[in-house]
Every structure is written in structure tokens, then in C-alpha cells.
Image (cartoon, rainbow, N blue to C red):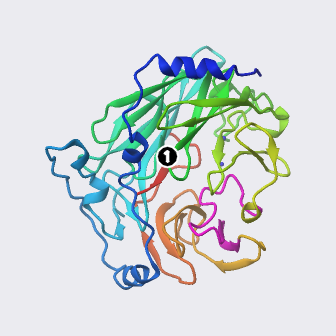
């Protein structure tokens, strides 16, 4: 394809300066979560998979705030595809997941030799079911249920985390932090956030002294590899806004400049990717290094799909592995798995055989089947080209 110590009471004191969240905020975050399909329902879905929705219903605004239905709830079709759209304009979904947002990259020059890589997001508007451009946020992650997003403001590292209502478009709550944050991720159940702290912006880029992209010009911007400014992570309770920070440093040569933390499959640990073996390091919520969970032994941090919902399979490039033995369970189509739609289907990038590998589209693939269902149009340009969009999936 990208140290400080915490006085824990400081975070709590800042959090108490704002009024507490209404009771049940975390429940509202998760209101839209759908229960996993049973085997019987999965059979019905397989029988009707040929029916592909191409339109998104608009929710009717009810009088009660909590009664308003989201666009992602109004259309419950198993597959919602727009194979003629790139980048997507209307809701895309398959099985239990949906495309919650996507972003493009651009380098904004700051000085003659320094720039900052900026994400421009298109976020699902839950009133209309369309992806809407926003330039307010430098970083976004979407909670399960797609009712709430965690957002960071433009200048990184940020000193507060916003909880954005995807129906109203308003920030419902700001969570202040003592140490600058540049990445946030929800736990699998949406009840917690892990926020990665940095001493400076991890998206800074510097003028390369060579032709990086082979276009014959020395006009490329690159991160300063081996110079990560990451300091640790917060684990924050979404409902209360309270949390604690843990110092978690590592040899900078083993980290990308941006190397954010994320949750384990069961949400009980966090992990960091590494650029060298063992490639991943897990931590408990107090910052202690711990062993990999047994069923994550063959998970790799840069394969976005990770474990299947039931924790038995690992999505990899071109194959699905048994989570415990690492043996190949099945070959699958697609270049790179991105998200599990259910225990038997994956959303992946796919390019037609014999074509440019970067000319790819979102597809739905089924384990043990040659069937490939297009979900989006084909992306254009090579890897890193301006305008190429990167998807963000969430459970719907």
C-alpha cells in the first residue's frame, strides 16, 4: 500500500466540567444494531441473494427522537449495491455490514519541504442514505449500528473527541483528553473507544529526495519512516466519557509513523501492528503486553476483515484460514478482504483477471462459491493516486 505518564484523575476532572451524558447514551449508540442472522435466516438470504436493492428508502421523521429510523434501517435488503457508482453516492451494504463512510487523501503543503496528508470524508447521512462530503474532521470511526461516529477536529493531535449523531449531523458530546489524540476506534460492541496518542501529527509528510512514484519528477511527499511519535493509548467508556491512558512505546523502527491501536475481536484487549515480526503486539487496558488470543494467532493487522463474526475463520488475501490451526479452509476470489458480511461471506476488493490490480471494485464473495456480486464501480488510478477512495465499514 501507511511518553509520558497519565495522571488519570486529570481526565476525569476535565470530563466532569461538562454535563454528564444522558442515561443510556451507549444504548442509543447501539440501538440500530441488528442481531446476527440465524442459520435459517442465512439460508433464506442465500436463496434470495439475486435480489439486489438499487434504491435507498428515506426515513420518515417521527415526533419522538428515539423513534426516528435510520436510512440503514429503512432498507433491510440483504444486498444493497450500486455497481455503477465510483465513488459511491448511495448506501452500499451486504449482510450485517454497510459502507459507513469513505475518504480520499490529498497532501496540503505547509512549507517548501513539509506537507500534511489530509483525509476528506464522505459520511453516510442517515436521513437520506447518501454519502455527504465533510471537511470538518481529520479522523472518523463509525460505531456499530451506524448511529454515532467518533470524530477528531482538523489539527492533529486533537485534545477532544466528538461523538457525532449521524442522523442530525450534530456533535452530541465532546470528551476532553489531556494528551493529543490522532486516531480513534470503537470496540466491537460500541461501548468503548481506544484513542491513540501522539506527540505530533502522524500524517506529516516531507519532500522526498528521489522519484518515489516513477513519474520522472522529484515532487513526492513521504512520511519519515522510523520516527514514530506515538506515546500510548486511552481506553474510554462511551457512556460516561471517562477513561485512562497507558504508556505504550515500542522501537520506532518497528512502527509506521501512524500506527494506531485497535481492539481485539472480543473487545477485551487492544493491539498495535508492527512492521517486523511478530507483526502485532497485544496489550491489556492497563498497557501491559500480553499474548495474542488463541484465535487471533493468524490475524494480520493490515488485513481489515480479521476474524469472522463467530471467531472461527480468518480472512486473508485469496484464502480463508482456520483461526486456530492456520490451515487453509477455502480459497476465495478477491484481492483483499475488507469486512465480513456474515460467517460465510466477505466484502473484498476485486479486479478482473488480467487487468490492472488497482482497477478494483467492492464485491461480495461467498466461501466455497465462484459467485462474485459487484457492490460498487471500479476505482481509478494507481495506489496513492489523488481521488482514490478508501472504505470504512460498520455493522448495520
In magenta segment, residue 250: no
Outermost residue to the front: 23
Give the magenta-colored segment's residue range: 297-322
Q: Residue at x 40, y 52 (%)?
A: 145
Q: Residue at x 67, y 25 (%)?
A: 198
Q: Local crowd at mark 1 within 10 Å, few (<14), some, or many (≥20)?
A: some
Q: Which percent across, then down, holds residue 261?
A: 66, 41
Position of 94 relative to 225 (above/below): below
Residue 220 appears in the figure: no
Q: Position of residue 373 (x, y in %)?
A: 43, 73
Q: Position of residue 37 (x, y in %)?
A: 43, 73
- Residue at numbered disc 1: 388
| Residue 305 lies in the magenta stretch | yes
Where is residue 324, by image quadrant? bottom right
Residue at image coords 78%, 45%: 274
Q: Main secondary structure of the magenta part?
A: loop
**Quadrant of the image containing the C terminus:** bottom left
- Disc 1 element: loop
Amino acid at each position: 500500500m501507511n511518553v509520558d505518564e497519565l495522571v488519570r484523575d486529570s481526565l476525569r476532572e476535565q470530563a466532569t466540567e461538562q454535563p454528564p451524558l444522558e442515561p443510556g447514551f451507549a444504548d442509543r449508540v447501539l440501538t440500530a444494531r441488528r442481531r446476527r442472522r440465524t442459520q435459517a435466516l442465512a439460508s433464506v438470504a442465500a436463496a434470495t441473494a439475486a435480489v439486489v436493492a438499487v434504491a435507498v428508502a428515506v426515513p420518515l421523521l417521527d415526533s419522538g427522537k428515539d423513534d426516528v429510523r435510520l436510512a440503514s434501517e429503512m432498507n433491510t435488503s440483504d444486498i444493497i449495491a450500486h455497481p455503477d457508482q465510483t465513488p459511491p453516492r448511495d448506501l452500499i451494504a451486504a449482510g450485517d455490514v454497510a459502507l459507513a463512510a469513505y475518504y480520499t487523501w490529498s497532501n496540503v503543503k505547509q512549507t517548501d519541504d513539509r506537507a500534511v496528508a489530509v483525509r476528506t470524508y464522505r459520511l453516510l447521512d442517515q436521513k437520506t442514505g447518501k454519502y455527504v462530503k465533510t471537511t470538518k474532521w481529520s479522523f472518523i470511526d463509525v460505531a456499530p449500528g451506524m448511529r454515532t461516529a467518533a470524530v477528531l477536529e482538523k489539527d492533529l493531535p486533537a485534545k477532544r473527541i466528538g461523538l457525532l449523531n449521524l442522523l442530525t449531523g450534530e456533535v452530541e458530546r465532546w470528551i476532553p483528553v489531556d494528551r493529543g489524540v490522532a486516531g480513534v476506534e470503537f470496540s466491537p460492541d460500541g461501548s468503548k473507544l481506544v484513542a491513540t496518542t501522539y506527540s505530533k501529527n502522524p500524517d506529516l509528510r516531507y519532500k522526498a529526495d528521489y522519484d518515489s512514484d516513477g513519474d520522472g519528477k522529484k515532487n513526492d511527499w513521504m512520511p519519515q519512516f522510523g520516527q514514530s511519535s506515538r506515546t500510548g493509548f486511552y481506553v474510554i467508556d462511551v457512556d460516561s466519557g471517562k477513561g485512562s491512558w497507558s504508556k505504550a512505546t515500542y522501537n520506532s523502527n518497528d512502527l509506521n509513523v501512524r500506527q494506531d491501536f485497535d481492539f481485539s475481536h472480543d473487545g477485551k484487549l487492544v493491539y498495535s501492528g508492527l512492521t517486523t515480526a511478530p507483526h502485532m503486539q497485544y496489550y491489556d487496558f492497563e498497557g501491559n503486553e500480553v499474548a495474542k488470543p488463541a484465535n487471533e494467532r493468524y490475524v494480520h493487522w493490515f488485513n481489515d476483515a480479521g476474524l469472522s463474526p463467530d471467531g472461527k475463520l480468518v480472512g486473508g488475501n485469496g484464502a480463508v484460514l482456520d483461526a486456530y490451526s492456520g490451515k487453509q479452509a477455502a480459497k476465495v476470489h478477491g484481492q483483499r478482504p475488507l469486512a465480513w458480511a456474515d460467517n460465510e461471506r466477505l466484502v473484498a476488493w476485486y479486479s478482473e483477471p488480467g487487468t490492472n490490480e488497482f482497477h478494483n471494485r467492492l464485491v461480495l464473495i461467498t466461501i466455497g462459491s465462484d459467485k462474485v456480486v459487484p457492490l460498487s464501480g471500479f476505482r481509478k488510478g494507481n495506489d496513492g493516486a489523488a481521488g482514490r477512495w478508501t472504505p470504512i465499514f460498520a455493522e448495520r
